[in-house]
Image (cartoon, rainbow, N blue to C red):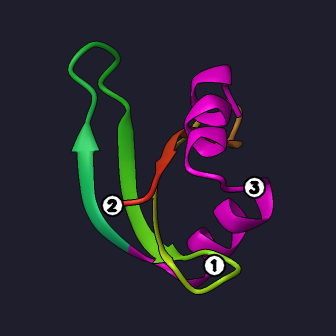
Amino acid sequence: MPIHAEEEMDDDGLTVFDVERCIFTGKILERQKDKNTAEWKYRINGESLTGSEVEVVAKISPTGKLVIITVYVP
């Protein structure tokens, strides 16, 4: 998780467990192609551990790992 995503997560009072739950309970709302890198990124809407709405923007890295780009409460 890049520093930007960690800072956004902290700003909204979320933890990595909230991010995980959002991904597991969520739906992909949108698939976007990055203009600079041509990589696909996904906007996922789901629930935090407390049941509140959370959105995660993530992509799959060239090594096959999930990279969390940002996290926020919509």
> Could you classify mark 3 by the number of other residues whose Cα lies within 10 Å: few (under 14), some (14-19), or many (20 or more)?
some
Name the chief secondary structure element in magenta.
helix
Real-space Cα separation, disc 1 to disc 2, in angstroms: 18 Å
Query: Residue 13, image x and y in percent?
Result: 65, 53
**Residue 39 to residue 56: above or below:** above
Q: Answer few, some or many: residues within 10 Å of disc 2's Cα (few below 14, many 20 plus, some between 14 and 19).
A: few
The residue identified by callout 2 is: 74
- Asked if the residue at tag 3 contacts the one at tag 1, i.e. Cβ–Cβ closer than 8 Å, the answer is no
Residue at the outermost top position: 36
Residue at 63% from the left image edge and 30% from the top image edge:
7
Q: Examine the image and state in which quarter residue 9 appears.
A: top right
Quadrant showing the N terminus: top right
Q: Residue at horizontal 58%, vertical 72%?
A: 22
Residue 19 lies in the magenta stretch = yes
**Front in this rendered view, residue 61 or 28:** 28
Of circles 1 and 3, the one toward us is: 3
Instruction: Give the label on residue 15, or none.
Output: 3
Q: Is residue 42 left or right of residue 34?
A: right
Lateral position of residue 19 relative to residue 59, left or right = right
Image coordinates of residue 74 in percent, x first then y, are: 33, 60
- Could you classify mark 1 by the number of other residues whose Cα lies within 10 Å: few (under 14), some (14-19), or many (20 or more)? few
The answer to whether residue 11 is above or below residue 47 is above
Q: Marks 1 and 3, Cα distance to the nearest angstrom?
A: 15 Å
Q: Report the front residue among 63 and 50.
A: 50
The residue wearing badge 1 is 24
Under mark 3, the amino acid is Thr
- What amino acid does circle 1 point to? Phe
Q: Which residues are magenta?
A: 1-27
Q: Amino acid at mark 2?
A: Pro
